[in-house]
């Protein structure tokens, strides 16, 4: 009987050892899973903290831009033509881009010729699609129910299965373009940096970005390149902005072009888009897009129209341009140290 008892004891000991090993394995797996989860949580918290820090610095960039637009010396004010300015901080870099809405194509006030030129520049749109979009825009913003050529009124929207029709009123925002029959997100994202509802009937070429100038009708490419180069040079040297050379006058060296009042550096009552993007040392980035207006005599220097975080419609200010490498239009025109703004 004793051997049998001894054999049973060995079986019990073996089972206990297996149970201990299984429990230890389970605990190791649980500990590893917990450690991995904690690392993920720590990484997530770090990312949230860094993003919040980047957004706070980007907000400072908007404040810097507003301050630089109000400098007493008009020639030292930042240009609102798409010029980029850089502020180097201890642990971050801010790039700030300013765009006057008067230098964009106003989808409420632009004539058919300008809107057609804009649509012709949209990639992958054939002539028929361009004509339909043009007609649909005109029918959306006019006050009648008369159908433009290739346009769209209530019936066309109903035939497309939509429960709404054109407002027959001016666009309240550029986002309303998404509702126009025939528009998709790719077309809107391509157009949004070039258009506005806060501009004038005629684009102010002095304030227009190089991308807007390239889609406007009847502008010579060589004149555009020369003007942009001269405008960048004037921004770097605190000189008046040169006049845009007329397409009907003989081409002359841009350095001899007449100097005019620096109208784009006078923001009173103008609506301006400020894009502030921050890149931290660890690679974290964040951006803010603010649409503001400086109102003369107001208690607050600027009235805020729109405020958007990490807008997808704007190319990163730290990315190299794929379309314009000769004019250096995507490089900062000036660099500043943090100490020049923060004491």
Image (tube, rainbow, N blue to C red):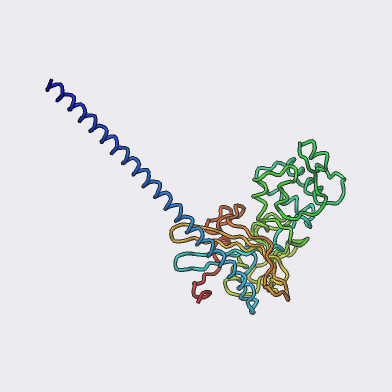
Q: Who's the residue at 60% across and 63% down the image?
A: 97
Q: Who's the residue at 39% across and 49% down the image?
A: 38
Q: Who's the residue at 67% across and 46% down the image?
A: 187
Across and down, in percent, residue 128 comes to 75, 40
Horizontal arrangement in the rendering, residue 16 relative to residue 65 (left or right):
left
In the displayed orientation, state which residue is furthest to the bottom.
72
Viewer-closest of 145 and 44: 44
Vertical relation: 65 (above or below) 4? below
Quick one: quadrant of the N terminus?
A: top left
Which of the 4 image quadrants contains residue 95? bottom right
Viewer-closest of 301 and 101: 301
Across and down, in percent, residue 26 comes to 32, 38
Viewer-closest of 309 and 250: 309
Across and down, in percent, residue 66 comes to 62, 70
Horizontal arrangement in the rendering, residue 343 relative to residue 99 (left or right):
left
Q: Who's the residue at 49% across and 56% down the image?
A: 48
Horizontal arrangement in the rendering, residue 32 relative to residue 230 (left or right):
left
């Amino acid at each position: 009987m004793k051997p049998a008892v001894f054999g049973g004891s060995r079986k019990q000991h073996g089972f206990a050892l297996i149970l201990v090993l299984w429990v230890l394995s389970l605990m190791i797996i649980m500990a590893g899973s917990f450690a991995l989860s904690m690392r993920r949580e720590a990484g997530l918290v770090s990312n949230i903290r860094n993003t919040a820090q980047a957004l706070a610095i980007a907000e400072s960039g908007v404040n810097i831009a507003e301050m630089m637009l109000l400098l007493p010396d008009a020639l030292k004010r930042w240009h609102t033509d798409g010029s980029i300015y850089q502020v180097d901080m201890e642990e971050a870099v801010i790039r700030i881009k300013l765009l006057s809405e008067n230098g964009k194509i106003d989808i409420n006030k632009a004539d058919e010729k300008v809107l057609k030129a804009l649509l012709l520049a949209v990639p992958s749109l054939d002539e028929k699609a361009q004509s339909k979009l043009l007609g649909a825009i005109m029918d959306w913003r006019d006050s009648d129910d008369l159908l433009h050529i290739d346009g769209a009124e209530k019936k066309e929207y109903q035939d497309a299965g939509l429960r709404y029709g054109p407002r027959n009123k001016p666009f309240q925002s550029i986002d309303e373009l998404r509702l126009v029959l025939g528009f998709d997100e790719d077309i809107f994202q391509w157009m949004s940096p070039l258009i506005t509802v806060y501009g004038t009937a005629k684009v102010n070429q002095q304030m227009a970005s190089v991308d807007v100038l390239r889609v406007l009708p009847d502008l010579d490419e060589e004149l555009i390149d020369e003007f942009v180069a001269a405008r960048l040079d004037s921004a770097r040297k605190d000189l008046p902005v040169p006049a845009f050379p007329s397409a009907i006058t003989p081409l002359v060296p841009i350095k001899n072009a007449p100097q005019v009042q620096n109208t784009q550096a006078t923001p009173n009552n103008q609506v301006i888009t400020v894009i502030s993007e921050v890149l931290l040392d660890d690679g974290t980035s964040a951006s803010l897009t603010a649409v503001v207006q400086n109102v003369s005599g107001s208690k607050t220097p600027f009235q805020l129209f729109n405020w958007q975080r990490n807008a997808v419609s704007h190319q990163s200010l730290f990315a190299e341009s794929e379309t314009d490498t000769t004019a250096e239009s995507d490089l900062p025109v000036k660099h500043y140290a943090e100490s020049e703004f923060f004491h």
